[in-house]
Amino acid sequence: MANGPAGKLREQVTETFKIASVMGARPQFVKAAMVSRAFSAQSGVKEILVHTGQHYDREMDQVFFEELRIPKPAYNLGVGSGSHATQTGEMMRRLEEVLEREAPRRVLVYGDTNSTLAGVLVAAKLKIPVDHVEAGLRSFNRAMPEEINRVVADHLASLLFCPTGTAVTNLAHEGLIQGVHQVGDVMYDATLMLAQASQSVDPFLEKMKVAPRDYLLLTLHRAENTERKQDFDRFFNGLGKLGHLILFPVHPRTSAFIKAHDITLPANVRTLPPVSYLQMLQLEKNALAILTDSGGVQKEAFFLQVPCLTLRRETEWVETIEAGWNRLVGLDPDAVEEGLRKHLDGSVRSSCNCFGNGKAAERIVEIETQMVTRESFDESREANAPNADGRSDVAVQCLRP
Ligand code: UD1
Ligand code: UDP
């Protein structure tokens, strides 16, 4: 940033700019952590972290801030749980006050949760440019709350930071081509940075007394998979017959469902409270295979080259399927059994560089910094020279692909 046209611009603009990052749920802490690190290495920009409070249990929230060294948020809106409208509406009400007070130059939102939706709606209505990290993902299933959140976020965002080429194509099909940047995946940045070191920080497998490849790892939390007891029971009965130890860190939504329906899980399924990010990376890295309905966990399985069965009918992360590391099995126990057998029989798998080079967060921060610097430069030129025709002289790196 110090050199080149943008660096020259930066020298002429001495102001410190505020950019607000809005987050609230577990996967957003992982994504925002990488971006926040990159911001802290960047002079001239002050990042204001706003936590909506969507996730609030220590193991869903605080533990990520500690492990990933995310600075304490300047604001925690303390919204907590509720129906979609109650939760999103309350976030919007509280976030509006914060953004009005802070008047950031831009707002960043991450992924596809209700915190993302609240962030884009509030910022767009306050006429603050809002930029979407992990733009362009589509399941093409509007029954998923996340799909609704993503579509709205992408159509309101000024800058669309896409993790993959597929995401760019999805946006183009919806007519979104302006402000689109294929930067890579910030979760890939995090995995690359921390997977290797995770074991020395906290040797979790030893504590759990399990050996590498001696277990399957399971996560399950999607609304669609925690609604019908019959499907849930059938799935777990199937897991009971697999004959593998299954480690299952349980999301609070799923815990609530198990408790409400008084469900007893099979003896080979060992439940754990939600684990920390570094613990999760170790569980993933050493699993024989992973069963999950999580978006983030599907990707991490791919990054760590562990076979994955996705407990859904579709996925946004099609590259993981195409490369042979992931299979869609839904909650169907027969498909799980068959998918696992095929994976373990050594099916053909390939790798790809489709998630970037581990520097997605740096690229996002570079683009954000260029944007605020350029805007400020343009504003000061406008103020000082009302007839300034020379705008085309301003040497700014083209930000569009
Ligand atoms: C949310 C996201 C989902 C994401 C997931 C990551 C939406 C619509 N969904 O789903 O896209 O994959 O986060 O984990 O935003 N709960 C607690 N403690 C907590 C948090 C939640 O007990 O700290 C329980 C509450 O009973 C709550 C339920 O979990 O009602 C669901 O939480 P919520 O944040 O609404 O959705 P998630 O299922 O976590
Ligand atoms: N994760 C974790 N502990 C757990 C389960 C998940 O640290 O017990 C991490 C996981 O490694 C990934 C992120 O949380 O980085 C994914 O979050 P989640 O599955 O809740 O949401 P999704 O990605 O499906 O939106």
Image (tube, rainbow, N blue to C red):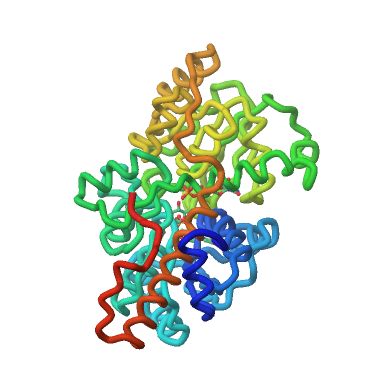
Residue at left 53%, top 54%?
Answer: 361
Q: Residue 6: x percent and y percent?
A: 47, 63
Residue 66, above or below 51: above
* Observer able to see residue 111: yes
Q: Residue 263: x percent and y percent?
A: 51, 43
Residue at left 34%, top 36%?
Answer: 314
In front of the other: 39 or 70: 39
Left or right: where 297 falls relative to 211: left
In front of the other: 305 or 343: 305
Which quadrant of the structure image shows residue 194? Answer: top right
Left or right: where 204 falls relative to 347: right
Question: Which quarter of the rendered picture does the N terminus lie within?
Answer: bottom right
Residue placed farthest to the top in the image?
A: 345
Q: Residue 399: x percent and y percent?
A: 37, 57
Residue 194, above or below 301: below
In front of the other: 149 or 11: 11
Which quadrant of the structure image shows residue 362? Answer: bottom right
* Observer able to see residue 252: no
Q: Residue 310: x percent and y percent?
A: 44, 33
